[in-house]
Amino acid sequence: MSTPTTTADDGFPATGRLASVDYGTVRIGVAICDPDWILASPLETHPVSTPEKDAQYFIDLAKSERIAAWVVGLPIHCDGGESDKSKESRKFAAWLKENTGLPTRLFDERFTTVAANAKIRQGKTTRKKTKQRVDAVAAQVLLESFLEACRYRGELAGHRLEDSTSDESLDDA
């Protein structure tokens, strides 16, 4: 069980700093990992603004944090089916790739917010602080899950943006 050693056919790298995104229409949680894909940390929560300002935020973030690729959470139902939120996340992931020029993968984000809330509660933070941090911590949980899936498989996990979900089950992500 090791991390992938080669770049995927969609240009997603096997090393380099990754940033994960817990997409929301009001707030977007962001987490990053080290270049060796060992540790993931919550970075910040970005309040959604205009498309132009949001694009500039992600371009600047990619540059300042030396991001090699993005992992965007894909909200799917427990049975593997998709919802309107899934379509919004797919659209956002394509927008993110287009605006930053970086490879982007989608990864199952089931239960990340529940896990994030549990992590935050362990830290005995106030309700206000919890609300401010939950999206970034959810992005951290997402990135940790992605990294672990890659190590377990020995290959990249998740779905390429070009992948269609109508023919396949997302349970294999």
Image (cartoon, rainbow, N blue to C red):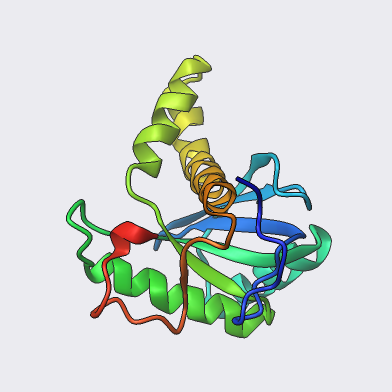
Vertical placement of residue 77 versus 8, above or below: above
Q: Quadrant of the N terminus?
A: top right
In the rendered image, residue 115, in percent from the top left (x then y), is placed at: 40, 33
Which residue is drawn at the image coordinates 23% and 67% (left, top)? 82
In the rendered image, residue 156, in percent from the top left (x then y), is placed at: 56, 63
Q: Is residue 75 visible?
A: no
Nearer-the-camera pick, 114 or 37 = 37
Vertical placement of residue 154 versus 68, above or below: above
Q: Give the tally of numbered discs.
A: 0
- The quadrant in which residue 159 appears is bottom left
Relative to 151, 82 lies left or right: left
Which residue is drawn at the image coordinates 55% and 44% (left, top)? 148
Q: Is residue 7 visible?
A: yes
Nearer-the-camera pick, 83 or 24 = 83
- The quadrant in which residue 6 appears is bottom right
Vertical placement of residue 148 versus 64, above or below: above
In the rendered image, residue 18, in percent from the top left (x then y), is placed at: 68, 58
Instruction: List the single residue furthest toward the front.
Output: 1
In the rendered image, residue 131, in percent from the top left (x then y), is placed at: 44, 36
Q: Quadrant of the C terminus?
A: bottom left
